[in-house]
Each structure stands twice: as C-alpha cells, then as structure tokens.
Amino acid sequence: MRIPVRTLGALALAAAFAATPARAAQDLLIGGGSVTGVYYQVALQVCSLVNKYSDGKYNCVGRPALGSVFNINAVNRGLLDFGVAQSDRNWQAYTGNADWEGKPVKDLRSVFSVHPETVLLVTRKDTGIRSVTDLKGKRVNIGNPGSGQRGNAMDVLRLYGIDVDKDIQAEGLQQHDASRALVDRKIDAFFYTVGNPSAAIEEPANSTDIRIIPINSPAIKRFVAERPYYVMTKIPAGTYRGVDEDVETYAVKATVVTSAKASEQMVYDVVKIVFEHLDELRGAHAAFRHLQPEEMLGGLSAPFHPGALRYYRERGFRIPKTLAE
C-alpha cells in the first residue's frame, strides 16, 4: 500500500518531535554542613522549595559539606552554586582575613542570611567542666579543618588564655562524630556553632547528662562589641534536656553565598522562590521559625549578587549601602 507523501512528511515531523528530549533542568548544588547540623537543613530545605516551585527549571541538590571555609572556596572555584557560611567567615573571605589573609575572595556575593547561630561549648556533667578555663588538660573537639566552628573555638580559647597546642588535647572531628564521642567518653567537651535546637546537641542530651558552658567573659564581650557580625545572646532554659538555666554566649548568622559569576536570572529565581514561600521554610525546622524577610538582609558582608539585589529592590526592601554594588 502506498502512503501519500504528505502523510509521510507528517509522520516524519511527529517522529522528530517525539525524539527531541524535553529541555533538561539546570542542576544546582548547595553546600551545607554536617548532616546533623542546621547548615545541611538550609541546603536541603532551600532545594526542596526550588524543586517544588521552579516548574522543572532547576534540579537542586543540597549536600553535606565541611563547613564555611570549604563552602566559600568551593563557590569561588565554581564547584558549588551556593554555599552556607557563617557571617564572620563571609566577612573574612571578602576582606582577605583569617584563612584568606592577603587573598580576598572578591567574587564572593551575598544572597541572604538565615538563622542566628550560637557558639556552644558542650560537656558531660561528670567531667567537672563548669567554665571555659576548666578545659585545660581535657580532650576537646574544636571542629574539623575548613569549618567556621573551628575558627570560633580558636577565638574562644585564645580569649580565655588557653593554648590549643599545649593546654588541651584538641580533636578535629566532624560534628556527628563529636556528638557520639562525647556520649562514649572519648572526648570531654566539644565546641559547635549552630542554630537551635540542633539534633547534634539533642542526641547527646538524650543519652547522657550534659552541661552547656557560658561563653561570656569580659574579653569575649569586648571581642563581640568590636565586630558587627557577632551578637551576644542566650540559649533559653529548656532548649535541651537537662539544661535548666539560660546560658549566655555569642552568635553569628548563617549566610547563603554565591559567586559573582553565577547567572543573575538563576539567583533571582532562587531568591524569589525562597522569599515567596517563606512560611514553608519556617515550618521545615525549628531554627527557621522566626525568620523575617528584611532581617534576612542583615549580617552580610560581601555585596549582594545582582540577582538577589534585583528581587529585593522589586520588594522595596531597605538595602544596606555597603551591600549594593
């Protein structure tokens, strides 16, 4: 049977369309932190919103990572599209201090900030540790290299006059390992910078009697007063099992960063999705419960990425002059 040429042409056209794959979603990677920490939840929950509301435009994956320093460097090298980093590390990287001494990351760009993160020192009650000075001679986890918490731990120890090389047995464990090591009596205490409540503190608190040590010496308070990315704060009594009094310490903010090389439209899309579905983000984790849009523009040091800036201007948010390029 002969098939008309017109019919053959229509069939060929239909076959061509059928063989053409749908436009592939753009892959996005967001680097978080330890799997028991809130940074990882930031990465997971932001990606969940992006995947849900981008109409298939993006395929976003939130990954555990080694923390602030790693994330900033990975973003700068193009290995991550976004990274979560402490506000102090945001400032240090952009201005060329600490791990970036003399080598500022000038392509670093801010996207938004998230929850406040307290600098915690957690111990078991049976160690006899009641103050930072009691750490001398103890086994203390100061955080893995490449994490913001390690920098905070080093600052605290220095301000309390403790030599990390001589006065303590310092460990560099990732946080999920440190939490278990405290319960198993392999370490006596750990530092952790995290939003509250955190599973990394809840898990040992539910397995042993813990104590959270105040970090509030006059030297600490002077240190905080001199740095705009830090604030003094308190962990309310009852946040963790067995911690029945407020504990004074200081805090940074979690910030989401990207590179100046990132697509303006992509960053705009991600920011728009997050801010227009903020109620869902608030409900995803207790640390996000009190997020307010304009407060999410605070605690940042690197300038805003043009995509983020575009959205904030559309919303009429007040933009700090130092962040508007």
Image (tube, rainbow, N blue to C red):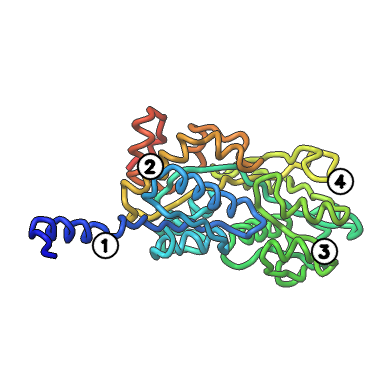
Eye-nearest disc, 3 or 1: 1
Residue drawn at x 59%, y 46% as measured from the top left: 252
Find disc 2 in the rendering and name its residue.
308
Looking at numbered disc 1 in the image, what kind of residue is underneath it?
Ala
Q: CA distance from mark 1 to mark 2?
A: 37 Å
- Dot 4 or dot 1: first in sequence order is 1
Q: Secondary structure at mark 4?
A: loop
Residue at left 63%, top 59%? 35
Q: Which residue in the structure is indicated by mark 1?
A: 19
Looking at the rendered image, the disc whose residue lies closer to the viewer, 3 or 2, is: 2
Q: Secondary structure at mark 2?
A: helix
Task: Name the quadrant of the C terminus.
Answer: top left
The x, y position of residue 4, in whole percent, is 9, 59
Disc 3 designates what residue? 188
Judging by the rendered image, the residue that carries numbered circle 4 is 242
Which quadrant of the structure image shows residue 59?
bottom left
Q: Amino acid at mark 3?
A: Asp
Point out the tag, 3 or 2, that comes first from the N-terminus. 3
Left or right? Give the position of 62 relative to 145.
Answer: left
Circle 4: residue type: Gly
